[in-house]
Each structure stands twice: as C-alpha cells, then as structure tokens.
Amino acid sequence: MIEKNLKINKNNHFTISQVLYMIAVVLNIFLRSMFHLGSIGIYLSYVPLVILLLISLWNNFNYKWLLWLIIGIIISIGTKRLQCLFMIFLIFASRDINLREILKPIVVIISVCLLIIYLATLVGIIPNLVLVRNGIERMAMGTQFPLVFSTYVLYACAYLTLIYYNSHPIKVSVLLFLIVIILNKLTNSRNDELCILLLILVIGINKLDLRIKKPFFLISYIITFILILFSIFVTQILPYTSNIYAFMDKLLSGRLNLQYILFSYYSPKLFGQNIPQQGLGGEQQVFNYFYIDNSYARILFMYGIIFFLFLLVTFGISIYKYYISRVYMLSFVLLILLLSGISADSLSLLTQNILVIPLFFIKVSGHKSYTLTLQSRLRKKKKL
C-alpha cells in the first residue's frame, strides 16, 4: 500500500477565492491585535467570506452539500450569533479555496502580520501587554493576550509542517524546536509549545511503516475525541476535593476551577446562551476574572448542543476521510490542532479558526491516479 503525500502546488497564480481568503486572514489577525478596529473591522472581515460562499455555490453546486449547508445555517441562526453563521460560511466556502495551493503564502501572511503588529509596539503605536504567571513574564507581542500570538505561531508551524515534512523533515523539525524555545521565552504558552513538539513527533511517525502508522492514527483519532469530551466534563467526573483534581487545576493554571464555576451556574442548551465573562484580553489586570478557555466548552455552552455536534461531526468525518484517502500527515496535524483547542479558546473564535477550518477541506482526490500509477509500477517490478 502506498501512502499519499500532500503535494504542494507551486503555481504562483491565485484564484479570486484564494485572494479573498487571504484578505480575510489578514483582517482577522489584526482584529486580535491591540489595534482597535471596532465593529467596522469585524463587519469588514465578514465581507470576503460572504463572497467566497457565493463563488463556491456557483462553482461547486451539489445537492448533498447544499443540504448540509442549509442545516448548518439554520443551526447557526438558532444560536443568534453572527460568528457561528460565518463559521458555517467558511466551512462550505473552503471547498473553493483549495488551501493546498496557498500554504506557503499563508505562512508568509501570518509571519508578516505578526511582525507588523510587534513592530507597532516598539514604536509605541500599540501596547505590548506583559502578564505574569507564577513569577514568569509573558508578553502578548502586540496581540490581546500571549496565547493569541502563540496560537497564530502554532498555526504557521502546522502549515510549515505540511509543506516540508516530506522534503525536509530534519530541517523543519529543528526549526520547529527553535520556535518552541523562542515562544517559551516570549509568551510562555505551554499549550501551543506542546502542540508544536507534537508536530515534530508526527514528522518522525510519518517515516514509520504503514502497518504501524495506520493503527497509531486510529488510536490517536479515538483518544483525541475522548479527550475533547473529557476536557468538557472533567469537573463532573473528578471529585472536587481529590488530589488529582487539585494537581490538574494547578497544571492548567486554574482552568478546572473556572469550568467548575461554569457548571455550577449554567448548563448546556440546544442553541446556546449568553454567558457574561471577564477575561484578560487587552488588559493586564482585571477584577472578578471569569473566562471559558476550553474551545469545546465555549462552543457547547455558548453556541449550543446542536452547533457543537454539527462541528464535531463535520470535523470528525473530514479527518477520517483523509485517513481513508491515506493522507496521514494532514490527519495527524488536524488532530493536534483539535487538541490545541482543549486549553485555549482559539477553535471557538472565527479570528483564529479561520486558519484551521479550510484544512479540513483540502482537495486530495487528485492524487488517486498518481497512487494507482505507482501501484501498477510496483506490480510490474514484482512480475519481472
């Protein structure tokens, strides 16, 4: 059996859909910076996604896909949140983006945007927030919170992994390790640093025999979704007074206690609810801090049970399709990005998941003939 690689298209000509998507990425990165773009910036970031969806419906009309889109729109309208509606738009517009062709430009866009934002702090245009955790200073680098900056770096690392894991596995692994060291000094974001280390691990796993890699993926696939569910209900499973609860709460910087409070005052509803929160985004110190860091708990409680299930089923099916298509590296990377959402809000917010959602819908069917050709060549060699 021959594994498919995610071949990167080196075509320098971008489609209208790809240009619109790249514009949307730029706008959303700056929305999470200390540049105060306000509601105008938010609404502007929605415009490319609307046009993208219309282009996708025109170019790729499919009744099954349209039915799934309509269901998604109805569910998102039930949540009464524009963010949910545009996440659905992005899911269905992703078919026409074909992210595989613009992985490198997206890495450049993320890097340049973060550099501009950081340079703006050096000249005093925007502040560089410095927060302290356990006596360690953590810089936000011009974004609203240190984890915001590090999450964008993680996504850029995921893209770099997909680009170079096959052609330059050692070089990209060394680069990722250096990025972890730098992030640890600047933002001390353990969640994202661990995920980048996992990217290095799967680069090594990719070199293993398929007989090992296939079961390893299936086990990882099951464990990932179990961990997602466990991370939501962990405070309902572990006794509040137990030592393991105290240890995990300390390890996760008090996140378990916040989820305990969440379950004490709220319960999941079909179409979500408004939950007043006070986070550190854009601030160095706040009183009465209460924020839902877990992306999946946020989606379940704030966007609703139905929207939560819709997203989880959509993502789960997409990853499994990659596995069936033998694009294992992309499958592993997506599992890591899903894990990153357990202790961060990134996957619940369009400003950041805009860089993740299209990865679930990369076109890989074009590799079929390539694989079959290689298989036929091997058969001929065996006959000889």
Image: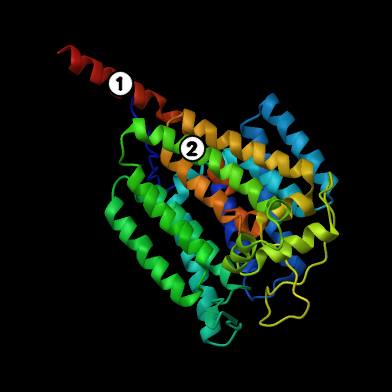
Residue under numbered circle 1: 375
Label whose residue precedes the other's in the sequence (2 or 1): 2
In the picture provided, is 327 more to the left or to the right than 304?
Answer: left
Along the viewing direction, whichever of 291 and 326 lies nearer the viewer: 291
Q: Is residue 155 above or below residue 122?
A: above
Along the viewing direction, whichever of 58 and 97 lies nearer the viewer: 97
Q: Secondary structure at mark 2?
A: helix
Residue 284 visible: yes
Mark 2 Cα-neighbour bin, 10 Å: few <14, some 14–19, many ≥20: few
Does the residue at mark 2 contact the one at mark 1 (Cβ under 8 Å)? no
Along the viewing direction, whichever of 4 and 196 lies nearer the viewer: 196
Dividing the image into 4 quarters, which one contains the N terminus? Answer: top left
What type is the residue that disc 2 sits on?
Answer: Ile
Dividing the image into 4 quarters, which one contains the C terminus? Answer: top left
Residue 296 visible: no
**Dot in front, 2 or 1:** 2
Single out the residue that lies furthest toward the top. 383
Q: Is residue 294 above or below residue 125?
A: above
Q: Which residue is at a point 72% across and 35% down the rendered structure image?
A: 69
Q: Secondary structure at mark 1?
A: helix
Mark 1 Cα-neighbour bin, 10 Å: few <14, some 14–19, many ≥20: some
Q: Which of the 4 quarters of the picture holds residue 83?
A: bottom right
Q: Which mark is residue 54?
A: none
Q: Which of the 4 quarters of the picture holds residue 377?
A: top left
Q: Which residue is at a point 66% across and 36% down the rendered structure image?
A: 313
Residue under numbered circle 2: 219
Q: Position of residue 115 (x, y in %)?
A: 48, 73
Q: Position of residue 234 (x, y in %)?
A: 67, 53
What type is the residue that disc 1 sits on?
Answer: Gln
